[in-house]
Amino acid sequence: MFNLRKDILANRVILVTGAGDGIGKEAAVSFAEHGAQVILLGRTIKKLEKVYDQICQIGAQEPAIVQLDLETLDEATSEQLKETIQDNYGKLDVLLHNAAILGTRVPLENYDSKEWASVIQTNLTSVFVLTKALLPLLKKSVDGRIIFTNSSVGKTPRAYWGAYSVSKFALTGFAKILSEELENTAKVVVTSVNPGATRTSMRRSAYPGEDPRKIKNVKTLMPLYLYLAGPDSKHEHGKEFSGNQQTWDWANRIKGPR
Ligand code: NDP
Protein backbone atom coordinates (compact mmCIF):
# COMPACT_ATOMS: atom_id res chain seq x y z
CA MET A 1 0.00 0.00 0.00
CA PHE A 2 2.81 2.42 0.91
CA ASN A 3 6.41 2.27 -0.23
CA LEU A 4 8.18 2.78 3.07
CA ARG A 5 11.83 2.26 4.02
CA LYS A 6 12.04 -1.47 4.60
CA ASP A 7 14.81 -1.25 7.21
CA ILE A 8 13.37 1.65 9.19
CA LEU A 9 13.06 -0.47 12.35
CA ALA A 10 16.22 -2.57 11.94
CA ASN A 11 17.80 -3.60 15.26
CA ARG A 12 14.78 -2.42 17.24
CA VAL A 13 13.11 -4.63 19.81
CA ILE A 14 9.41 -3.78 20.00
CA LEU A 15 6.75 -5.05 22.39
CA VAL A 16 3.13 -4.72 21.23
CA THR A 17 0.28 -5.36 23.68
CA GLY A 18 -2.92 -6.75 22.21
CA ALA A 19 -0.93 -8.06 19.25
CA GLY A 20 -3.41 -10.80 18.39
CA ASP A 21 -6.06 -8.70 16.69
CA GLY A 22 -7.03 -5.35 15.21
CA ILE A 23 -4.59 -2.46 15.27
CA GLY A 24 -2.05 -4.29 17.46
CA LYS A 25 -1.88 -7.21 15.06
CA GLU A 26 -1.39 -4.98 12.03
CA ALA A 27 1.23 -2.91 13.86
CA ALA A 28 3.16 -6.02 14.93
CA VAL A 29 3.24 -7.40 11.38
CA SER A 30 4.15 -4.01 9.96
CA PHE A 31 6.95 -3.50 12.51
CA ALA A 32 8.38 -6.95 11.73
CA GLU A 33 8.11 -6.29 7.99
CA HIS A 34 10.22 -3.18 8.53
CA GLY A 35 13.04 -4.94 10.33
CA ALA A 36 12.02 -5.07 14.02
CA GLN A 37 12.34 -7.92 16.46
CA VAL A 38 8.76 -8.03 17.66
CA ILE A 39 7.40 -9.36 20.96
CA LEU A 40 3.73 -10.28 20.59
CA LEU A 41 1.86 -9.88 23.88
CA GLY A 42 -1.76 -10.95 24.17
CA ARG A 43 -4.18 -13.20 25.98
CA THR A 44 -5.38 -15.56 23.21
CA ILE A 45 -2.60 -17.90 22.17
CA LYS A 46 -4.27 -19.05 18.92
CA LYS A 47 -4.47 -15.47 17.67
CA LEU A 48 -0.85 -14.79 18.63
CA GLU A 49 0.28 -17.94 16.83
CA LYS A 50 -1.50 -16.81 13.68
CA VAL A 51 0.32 -13.47 13.82
CA TYR A 52 3.56 -15.38 14.46
CA ASP A 53 2.95 -17.47 11.32
CA GLN A 54 2.09 -14.41 9.27
CA ILE A 55 5.36 -12.73 10.29
CA CYS A 56 7.43 -15.83 9.56
CA GLN A 57 5.73 -16.20 6.18
CA ILE A 58 6.82 -12.76 5.04
CA GLY A 59 10.41 -13.71 5.89
CA ALA A 60 10.76 -11.27 8.79
CA GLN A 61 12.62 -11.98 12.03
CA GLU A 62 10.97 -14.69 14.11
CA PRO A 63 8.82 -12.94 16.70
CA ALA A 64 8.48 -13.88 20.36
CA ILE A 65 5.12 -14.72 21.92
CA VAL A 66 4.15 -13.66 25.44
CA GLN A 67 0.75 -15.00 26.46
CA LEU A 68 -0.43 -12.79 29.26
CA ASP A 69 -3.78 -11.53 30.48
CA LEU A 70 -3.43 -7.83 31.30
CA GLU A 71 -6.49 -8.05 33.49
CA THR A 72 -4.53 -10.09 36.02
CA LEU A 73 -1.09 -8.59 35.41
CA ASP A 74 0.84 -7.91 38.62
CA GLU A 75 4.29 -6.56 39.43
CA ALA A 76 5.87 -10.01 39.83
CA THR A 77 4.77 -11.11 36.35
CA SER A 78 5.90 -7.82 34.84
CA GLU A 79 9.30 -8.21 36.51
CA GLN A 80 9.60 -11.72 35.03
CA LEU A 81 8.79 -10.31 31.61
CA LYS A 82 11.46 -7.66 32.08
CA GLU A 83 14.05 -10.32 33.01
CA THR A 84 13.12 -12.41 29.97
CA ILE A 85 13.48 -9.45 27.61
CA GLN A 86 16.74 -8.46 29.32
CA ASP A 87 18.16 -11.98 28.95
CA ASN A 88 17.12 -12.35 25.31
CA TYR A 89 17.67 -8.87 23.90
CA GLY A 90 19.41 -6.75 26.55
CA LYS A 91 17.08 -3.79 25.93
CA LEU A 92 13.65 -2.70 24.74
CA ASP A 93 13.37 0.03 22.09
CA VAL A 94 9.63 0.47 21.71
CA LEU A 95 6.67 -0.29 23.96
CA LEU A 96 3.33 0.04 22.17
CA HIS A 97 0.50 0.10 24.71
CA ASN A 98 -2.37 -0.92 22.45
CA ALA A 99 -4.56 -3.53 24.20
CA ALA A 100 -7.87 -2.38 25.61
CA ILE A 101 -11.40 -3.55 26.20
CA LEU A 102 -14.55 -1.59 25.58
CA GLY A 103 -16.86 -2.66 28.38
CA THR A 104 -20.57 -2.07 28.05
CA ARG A 105 -22.08 1.28 27.21
CA VAL A 106 -24.67 2.03 29.90
CA PRO A 107 -25.37 4.93 32.25
CA LEU A 108 -22.95 5.17 35.17
CA GLU A 109 -25.75 4.45 37.60
CA ASN A 110 -26.18 1.03 35.97
CA TYR A 111 -22.49 0.28 35.38
CA ASP A 112 -21.50 -3.07 36.85
CA SER A 113 -18.68 -2.54 39.36
CA LYS A 114 -16.90 -5.79 38.47
CA GLU A 115 -16.81 -4.72 34.86
CA TRP A 116 -15.61 -1.27 35.94
CA ALA A 117 -12.65 -2.88 37.72
CA SER A 118 -11.91 -5.11 34.76
CA VAL A 119 -11.85 -2.25 32.23
CA ILE A 120 -9.76 0.01 34.47
CA GLN A 121 -7.27 -2.80 35.19
CA THR A 122 -6.93 -3.79 31.53
CA ASN A 123 -6.84 -0.33 29.96
CA LEU A 124 -5.07 1.66 32.66
CA THR A 125 -3.53 -0.15 35.63
CA SER A 126 -1.75 -2.73 33.46
CA VAL A 127 -0.27 0.16 31.46
CA PHE A 128 1.19 1.60 34.68
CA VAL A 129 2.52 -1.77 35.87
CA LEU A 130 4.07 -2.63 32.51
CA THR A 131 5.57 0.83 32.02
CA LYS A 132 7.10 0.76 35.50
CA ALA A 133 8.67 -2.66 34.96
CA LEU A 134 9.95 -2.04 31.43
CA LEU A 135 11.20 1.54 31.78
CA PRO A 136 14.71 0.43 32.85
CA LEU A 137 14.99 -1.61 29.61
CA LEU A 138 13.66 1.29 27.52
CA LYS A 139 16.31 3.52 29.08
CA LYS A 140 18.95 1.09 27.81
CA SER A 141 17.85 1.82 24.26
CA VAL A 142 19.70 4.65 22.50
CA ASP A 143 16.38 5.74 20.98
CA GLY A 144 13.48 4.48 23.12
CA ARG A 145 9.78 4.99 22.51
CA ILE A 146 6.59 4.55 24.51
CA ILE A 147 3.45 4.85 22.41
CA PHE A 148 0.08 5.10 24.15
CA THR A 149 -3.23 4.41 22.42
CA ASN A 150 -5.97 6.86 23.24
CA SER A 151 -9.44 7.61 21.93
CA SER A 152 -11.75 10.55 21.22
CA VAL A 153 -13.67 9.61 24.39
CA GLY A 154 -10.42 10.15 26.31
CA LYS A 155 -10.57 13.80 25.26
CA THR A 156 -14.27 14.63 25.22
CA PRO A 157 -16.50 12.90 27.75
CA ARG A 158 -19.26 10.82 26.20
CA ALA A 159 -22.36 9.61 28.04
CA TYR A 160 -22.68 5.82 28.46
CA TRP A 161 -19.02 5.08 27.65
CA GLY A 162 -18.31 4.58 31.38
CA ALA A 163 -15.04 2.97 32.42
CA TYR A 164 -13.63 2.91 28.87
CA SER A 165 -13.92 6.68 28.56
CA VAL A 166 -12.57 7.19 32.08
CA SER A 167 -9.61 4.86 31.42
CA LYS A 168 -8.70 6.77 28.26
CA PHE A 169 -9.00 10.11 30.08
CA ALA A 170 -6.63 8.77 32.69
CA LEU A 171 -4.24 7.57 29.98
CA THR A 172 -4.12 11.12 28.61
CA GLY A 173 -2.95 12.24 32.04
CA PHE A 174 -0.59 9.30 32.47
CA ALA A 175 1.15 9.99 29.16
CA LYS A 176 1.48 13.68 30.01
CA ILE A 177 2.95 13.01 33.46
CA LEU A 178 5.37 10.42 32.09
CA SER A 179 6.50 12.65 29.24
CA GLU A 180 7.20 15.49 31.69
CA GLU A 181 9.11 13.16 34.02
CA LEU A 182 11.23 11.83 31.16
CA GLU A 183 11.74 15.20 29.49
CA ASN A 184 15.29 15.77 30.73
CA THR A 185 16.20 12.42 32.16
CA ALA A 186 16.11 9.85 29.41
CA LYS A 187 16.18 9.32 25.67
CA VAL A 188 12.71 7.80 25.78
CA VAL A 189 10.23 9.61 23.55
CA VAL A 190 6.62 9.39 24.77
CA THR A 191 3.76 9.83 22.30
CA SER A 192 0.03 9.02 22.08
CA VAL A 193 -2.09 7.98 19.14
CA ASN A 194 -5.83 8.34 18.82
CA PRO A 195 -6.42 5.94 15.92
CA GLY A 196 -9.88 7.33 15.15
CA ALA A 197 -12.61 5.12 13.73
CA THR A 198 -10.85 2.01 12.46
CA ARG A 199 -12.33 -1.24 11.14
CA THR A 200 -11.70 -3.77 13.96
CA SER A 201 -13.70 -6.05 16.28
CA MET A 202 -13.82 -3.30 18.90
CA ARG A 203 -15.29 -0.84 16.44
CA ARG A 204 -17.87 -3.43 15.32
CA SER A 205 -18.96 -3.99 18.94
CA ALA A 206 -19.19 -0.27 19.60
CA TYR A 207 -21.17 0.51 16.43
CA PRO A 208 -22.95 -2.67 15.30
CA GLY A 209 -25.27 -0.83 12.92
CA GLU A 210 -22.47 0.88 11.00
CA ASP A 211 -21.41 -0.10 7.49
CA PRO A 212 -17.83 -1.34 8.02
CA ARG A 213 -16.91 -0.44 4.44
CA LYS A 214 -17.17 3.21 5.41
CA ILE A 215 -14.60 2.80 8.19
CA LYS A 216 -10.89 3.04 7.45
CA ASN A 217 -8.73 -0.06 7.18
CA VAL A 218 -6.06 -0.59 9.88
CA LYS A 219 -3.38 -0.52 7.19
CA THR A 220 -3.87 3.21 6.68
CA LEU A 221 -2.63 3.80 10.25
CA MET A 222 0.66 2.02 9.73
CA PRO A 223 2.76 4.89 8.34
CA LEU A 224 2.02 6.81 11.56
CA TYR A 225 2.89 3.86 13.82
CA LEU A 226 6.07 3.18 11.84
CA TYR A 227 7.02 6.83 12.03
CA LEU A 228 6.50 6.95 15.81
CA ALA A 229 8.36 3.66 16.40
CA GLY A 230 11.24 4.65 14.13
CA PRO A 231 14.24 6.98 14.28
CA ASP A 232 12.56 9.99 12.62
CA SER A 233 10.25 10.79 15.56
CA LYS A 234 12.94 11.84 18.07
CA HIS A 235 11.53 15.35 18.32
CA GLU A 236 7.90 14.30 18.92
CA HIS A 237 8.21 13.83 22.69
CA GLY A 238 4.96 14.51 24.58
CA LYS A 239 2.84 14.90 21.44
CA GLU A 240 -0.49 13.37 20.52
CA PHE A 241 -1.35 12.15 17.03
CA SER A 242 -4.59 11.45 15.21
CA GLY A 243 -4.86 8.42 12.97
CA ASN A 244 -7.52 10.22 10.94
CA GLN A 245 -5.13 12.75 9.52
CA GLN A 246 -2.15 13.04 7.29
CA THR A 247 -1.55 9.40 6.41
CA TRP A 248 0.39 10.50 3.37
CA ASP A 249 2.36 12.96 5.44
CA TRP A 250 3.65 10.18 7.70
CA ALA A 251 4.26 7.95 4.71
CA ASN A 252 6.24 10.69 2.97
CA ARG A 253 8.45 11.14 6.02
CA ILE A 254 9.59 7.54 5.95
CA LYS A 255 9.21 6.55 2.32
CA GLY A 256 11.73 4.43 0.52
CA PRO A 257 13.25 4.60 -2.96
CA ARG A 258 10.82 4.12 -5.82
P1 NDP B 1 -9.52 -5.04 19.17
O1 NDP B 1 -10.58 -5.40 20.12
O2 NDP B 1 -9.68 -5.37 17.73
O3 NDP B 1 -8.12 -5.63 19.66
C1 NDP B 1 -7.72 -5.44 20.99
C2 NDP B 1 -6.60 -6.40 21.32
O4 NDP B 1 -6.31 -6.25 22.72
C3 NDP B 1 -6.99 -7.85 21.09
O5 NDP B 1 -5.93 -8.56 20.52
C4 NDP B 1 -7.28 -8.34 22.51
O6 NDP B 1 -7.04 -9.71 22.72
C5 NDP B 1 -6.27 -7.53 23.31
N1 NDP B 1 -6.65 -7.54 24.71
C6 NDP B 1 -7.82 -7.14 25.24
N2 NDP B 1 -7.83 -7.39 26.56
C7 NDP B 1 -6.64 -7.96 26.86
C8 NDP B 1 -6.07 -8.47 28.04
N3 NDP B 1 -6.73 -8.47 29.20
N4 NDP B 1 -4.84 -9.00 28.00
C9 NDP B 1 -4.17 -9.04 26.83
N5 NDP B 1 -4.65 -8.58 25.67
C10 NDP B 1 -5.88 -8.06 25.68
O7 NDP B 1 -9.33 -3.46 19.36
P2 NDP B 1 -8.71 -2.36 18.37
O8 NDP B 1 -7.62 -2.93 17.59
O9 NDP B 1 -9.84 -1.66 17.72
O10 NDP B 1 -8.14 -1.32 19.45
C11 NDP B 1 -6.76 -1.16 19.72
C12 NDP B 1 -6.59 0.11 20.51
O11 NDP B 1 -7.05 1.22 19.77
C13 NDP B 1 -7.34 0.13 21.84
O12 NDP B 1 -6.56 0.75 22.81
C14 NDP B 1 -8.56 0.97 21.52
O13 NDP B 1 -9.07 1.59 22.68
C15 NDP B 1 -7.97 1.97 20.55
N6 NDP B 1 -8.95 2.62 19.67
C16 NDP B 1 -9.56 1.92 18.67
C17 NDP B 1 -10.45 2.54 17.83
C18 NDP B 1 -11.14 1.82 16.71
O14 NDP B 1 -11.98 2.45 16.02
N7 NDP B 1 -10.85 0.55 16.46
C19 NDP B 1 -10.78 3.98 17.98
C20 NDP B 1 -10.07 4.62 19.07
C21 NDP B 1 -9.20 3.95 19.88
P3 NDP B 1 -8.09 -10.83 22.23
O15 NDP B 1 -7.99 -10.79 20.75
O16 NDP B 1 -7.56 -12.06 22.83
O17 NDP B 1 -9.42 -10.39 22.75
Image (cartoon, grey):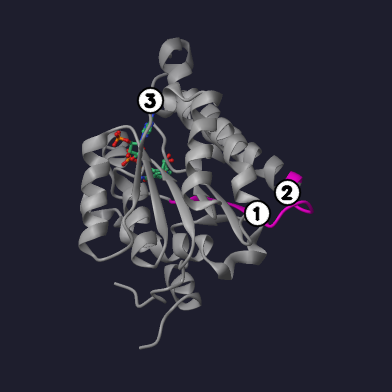
Q: Which residues are magenta?
A: 181-195
Give yes or no for contact between labels 2 and 1 (Cβ–Cβ under 8 Å).
yes
Q: Residue at x 67, y 65 (%)?
A: 235
Q: Looking at the image, is mark 3 or mark 2 nearer the viewer?
A: 2
Instruction: Give the quadrant of ligand 1.
Output: top left
The kind of residue on which mark 3 rests is: Gly
Look at the numbered disc 2 and give the secondary structure of its residue.
helix
Q: Label 1 is placed on what type of residue?
A: Val
* Cα–Cα gap, marks 2 and 1: 7 Å
Q: Is residue 230 left or right of residue 65?
A: right
* Disc 2 residue: CB within 8 Å of ligand 1: no
Tag 3 residue: 103
Q: Earlier in the sequence, mark 3 or mark 2?
A: 3
Would you say 15 lies left or right of 21 here?
right
Of 54 and 228, the residue lying toward us: 54
**Is 182 within the magenta?**
yes
Please give the label number shown on residue 117: none
Q: Residue at x 26, y 50 (%)?
A: 52
Q: Nearer the viewer, mark 3 or mark 1?
A: 1
| Callout count | 3
Residue under label 2 = 182
Q: CA distance from mark 3 to mark 2?
A: 32 Å
- Within 10 Å of disc 1 (Cα), the crowding (few <14, some 14-19, many 20+) is many
The residue under label 1 is 188
- Label 2, residues with CA under 10 Å away: few <14, some 14-19, many ≥20: some
